[in-house]
Amino acid sequence: MHDSASEWVAEEIFHKTKPSIDQLAKGLYGQTLIDTEDAPVAGESLFPIKGKQKYLAEDFIWQSVSGHPYILPLYAKFYNSNKFRYNFISQYLPMVNLRKFMKTHKVLQTKVCRVLTSQIASAICFIHNKDIFHRDVNSKNILICSDGKAKLSNFKHSVVR
């Protein structure tokens, strides 16, 4: 059962009608999938171990902060009853996390450091103004897009004060 029409559309597109879905990453709580054909979207499929309450909390927080230019936007969410998994659909851009970016570039120019720091600080101030605390800001959860913008991601450990 879906809560909204957009959740139904997300499941139909992402899990039932797309032969071009590839696994991007897999971790303890779930896996990240990418549509390699049409739309630039990625989906996170969460294993049941994470639980409905944790999923709902992450969903609420991610929706609350999704409109900021330096936060990875959430497009849709749905529950796949056939696989008992909770799913998020977000923007997919050719990007790399800050950790890999720094390993590749070794030394960053001061101007680049200032710009990236300013963007992430802007995202953190934005979520703090909503009484939300990320609790896991690190170089793996900061994505660097091909246009040079930083995006804060991964709201699994976030809390509302």
Image (spheres, grey):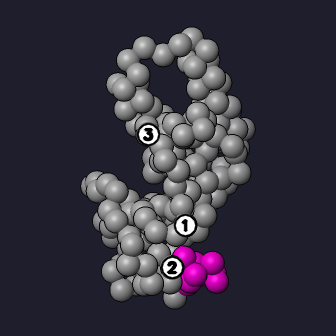
In whole angstroms, how far apart are the C-alphas of marks 1 and 2? 10 Å
Q: Which mark is residue 112?
A: none
- Overall secondary structure of the magenta section: helix
Q: Is residue 24 above or below residue 14?
A: above
Kindly identify which residue carries mark 2.
13
The local crowd at label 3, few if under 14, some if 14 to 19, many if 20 or more residues have their Cα within 10 Å, is some
Residue 70: give x, y in percent of width and height: 64, 40
Q: Nearer the viewer, residue 59 or 20?
A: 20
For mark 1, does the 10 Å Cα neighbourhood hold few (<14), some (14 to 19), or many (20 or more) residues? few
Contact (Cβ within 8 Å) of mark 1 with mark 2: yes
Q: Quadrant of the C terminus?
A: top right
Task: Tell me the quarter of the picture where residue 80 sits.
Answer: bottom left
**116 horizontally vs 55: left or right:** right
Q: Say above or below: 61 vs 117.
A: below
Residue at the (43%, 39%) spot, across then down: 96
Three-letter amino acid code of the residue under disc 2: Ile
Q: Quadrant of residue 6?
A: bottom right
Which residue is more in the foreground, 151 or 157? 151
In this rendering, the answer to whether 3 lies above or below 70 is below
Q: Describe the element under mark 2 as helix, strand or loop.
A: helix
Mark positioned earlier in the residue sequence (1 or 3) = 1
In the rendered structure, which disc, 2 or 3, sits on the residue that comes first in sequence?
2
Of callouts 1 and 2, which one flags the residue occurring earlier in the amino acid sequence?
2
- Rounded to the nearest whole Å, what is the CA distance between mark 2 and mark 3? 25 Å
Which amino acid does the dot numbered 3 rest on? Val
Residue beneath label 1, please? 39
The boundaries of the magenta stretch are 2-10
The Cα–Cα distance between marks 1 and 3, rounded to whole angstroms, is 19 Å
Seen from the viewer's position, the closer of residues 136 and 153 is 153
Which residue is labeled 3 in the image?
A: 96
Q: Magenta stretch: residue 4 in it?
A: yes
